[in-house]
Amino acid sequence: MIIAIGCDHAGYPLKEAVKEKLIAEGHEVLDVGTNSTESVDYPIYGKAVGEAVASGKAERGVAICGSGIGISIACNKVKGIRCALCTSVEMAEMCRRHNNANVIAMGARMISQELAFEMIDTWMKTEFEGGKHLRRINMLEEI
């Protein structure tokens, strides 16, 4: 699977760890930056992740900033993106199962690397349930 990944300066160390993990698991990673801990603006990278997924260059995306909040908002500004900010494995599962989230966001200052890896594992393997949830996804797309 091709995964777009992006972050701001606060998310850079976690982004690099997640990127290594995904590559080791056989995924192709499209890294849209940033590439250091030098201060940058998260909307640039949230938009880049969202656009990579929405355009089909990537099948899913991972977005990371300090809290996960700002970058998730930026991702969700891109038409066709359903980015879910997750802070638990359960949230990572449900955002796929019920919301068919195509981008997961996380806060590098809020969670451990271990939890981030567990959330990514769950998010990657969980399938969308469809059914009544598809109707709701379609409603979201109309907004």
Image (cartoon, grey):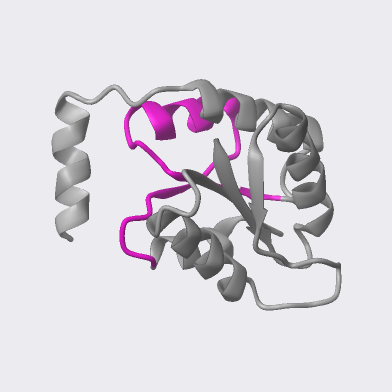
Q: Residue at x 21, y 31 (%)?
A: 133
State the image quarter where residue 118 is shown: top right
Q: Give yes or no for residue 46 being in the magenta stretch.
A: no
Residue drawn 81% across the image and 49% down it: 16
In the foreground, 35 or 137? 35
Count every numbered label the image shows and give the total. Answer: 0
Let me know if residue 71 appears in the view: yes
Is residue 44 found left or right of 98 in the rendered image? right
Q: Residue at x 48, y 26 (%)?
A: 93
x, y percent for residue 94 = 42, 28
Name the one closer to the observer, 108 or 56.
56
Residue 14 position in % (x across, y down) = 79, 48
Q: Quadrant of residue 55?
A: bottom left
Q: Give how far across and how far down residue 109 sits, in percent.
A: 76, 52
Q: Image height check: is 1 above or below 70?
A: above
Q: Quadrant of the N terminus?
A: top right
Can residue 63 be seen here? The reply is: no
Identify the residue at image location x=85%, y=75%. 38
Between residues 4 and 135, which one lies in front from this camera angle?
A: 4
Q: Quadrant of the C terminus?
A: bottom left
Apparent side of residue 5 relative to residue 110 in the rendered image (left or right): left
| Location of residue 67 in the rendering, given as x and y in whole percent from the top left corner | 66, 57
**Residue 99, magenta (yes or no):** yes
Magenta highlight range: 78-107
